[in-house]
Image (cartoon, helix red, strand yellow):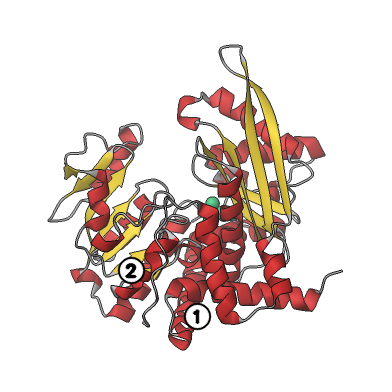
Amino acid sequence: MSYIEPAPIKDKENPLDSMMSRFDEAARLLGISDEIYNILKTPTKQVIVGLPITMDSGKIEVFQGYRVIHSNILGPSKGGIRYDPGVTLNEVQALAAWMTWKCAVVDIPYGGAKGGITCNPREMSAGELERLTRAYTLSMLDVFGPDRDIPAPDMGTGPREMAWLMDEYSKSLGMTVNSVVTGKPLVLGGSLGRVEATGRGVMVCALAGMEKLRINPYKATCAVQGFGNVGSHAARLLHERGVNILAISDMSGAYYNEKGIDIDAAAAYVEQNNRSLEGFTGAEKIPAGDLLTLKVDILVPAAKEDVITEENMHKIEARMIVEGANGPTAAVADAILNNKGILAVPDILANAGGVSVSYFEWVQNRLGYKWTQERIHRRSDRIMREAFEKVYNTSVEYQIPMRIAAYIVAIDKVAKTYTFRGGY
Ligand code: GLU
């Protein structure tokens, strides 16, 4: 890989800057026109709502909800809904754009969107969350739709919230419309394989990357940050393929075992311990930040944005990073990692397994049909593998890191589509 001038160091990066700096670099390399550049950097639609909710105490609290449609040029926009105290318009804008690039990288016929509510789901009761989800859905009735904008789970939401959303939308229209949302429980038209889809895509990318770097999975070591929906499945699936997982972490801290962690035991422990690794005895507790700088072959950041930063970028020792989370690497760290020869498989490729199986869920709902798990795995593995090769080959062709190559693949597709469709 060629040498890249490190970006100037600045304070904490916000997600939108982090997305835009990569977008700018790829747009420049591709040589897209100023007109197309301006179109692609501007979200198509942004909706902000105030949601007054009666809490269990009887008090009314007002929550801020967002939905940003970054682009619907490739098809209906697609993207999850995040419930987290840190949700801001800036973050939702970045996540929405990432969805556009992600869907384009894996070549599925969707634009990109993201939603969020600034709230702390860990401190809310099921009843409060249900009222909030239903109120949010009602406020987005003219935004959502199977041919318009299709939400899905993200941080802080899951099949339960998607079921409420599907129900509220369906009641408002007077008919059952399961294709309005993906990531639903199986009985409501959810897809087999959706729950582990993102983690499975991470595994496929990690194996593809190991092949390029000539790392034998049976001799490889790995650290996984985050043991939620993405990290736990990625760890388990890699473990099943021979990779030794030396460290895992969640909100309770990081856990290290130099001989390797029994991932099934960790998953079983979390299951009966209120979804937390706290007290897990199959590994010793280490300072949370140390997980990222362990000397392992593969590092999987699968928790949140901006964890590989100017503070720890020089200390990263992994040979390969596979980004399960959205935006875990600050843009300022890209050049350093590249100059250290680390292969970074970027978020918009590595975690696209989730939206790929969301696409299959939507297709099945529209067909009124159900595919087998085997078919879902086979097709999503193929999508991920082909996208990996396309991005890898682009990175070789342009002599650039895989991250910028992924943006090039995506921007090229969206820009060409726009040029054919035309504007006003
Ligand atoms: N929230 C997930 C993501 O960031 C899934 C989106 C979807 O399935 O639409 O990719």
Q: Quadrant of ligand 1?
A: bottom right
The residue depicted at 68 percent of the width and 66 percent of the height is 40
Report the front residue among 180 and 78: 78
Q: Secondary structure at mark 1?
A: helix
Is residue 206 found left or right of 68 in the rendered image? left
> How far is disc 2 from disc 1 in space, using C-alphas?
21 Å
Q: Which residue is mark 2?
A: 337
Is residue 336 found left or right of 399 in the rendered image? left
The residue depicted at 36 percent of the width and 56 percent of the height is 309
Kindly indicate the quadrant of the structure image that contains residue 33.
bottom right
Report the front residue among 300 and 153: 300
Report the front residue among 165 and 192: 165
Furthest residue to the top? Answer: 58
Question: In which quadrant will I find the C terminus?
Answer: bottom right
Q: Which residue is mark 1?
A: 390
Question: In which quadrant will I find the N terminus?
Answer: bottom left
Q: Amino acid at mark 1?
A: Lys
Q: Residue 94, percent across and down?
A: 57, 54
Q: Is residue 148 above or below residue 217?
A: above
Dot 1 surroundings within 10 Å: few (below 14), some, or many (20 or more)? some
Q: Residue 372, percent across and down?
A: 53, 61
- Asked whether residue 225 is in view, the answer is yes
Q: Secondary structure at mark 2?
A: helix
The residue depicted at 31 percent of the width and 69 percent of the height is 320
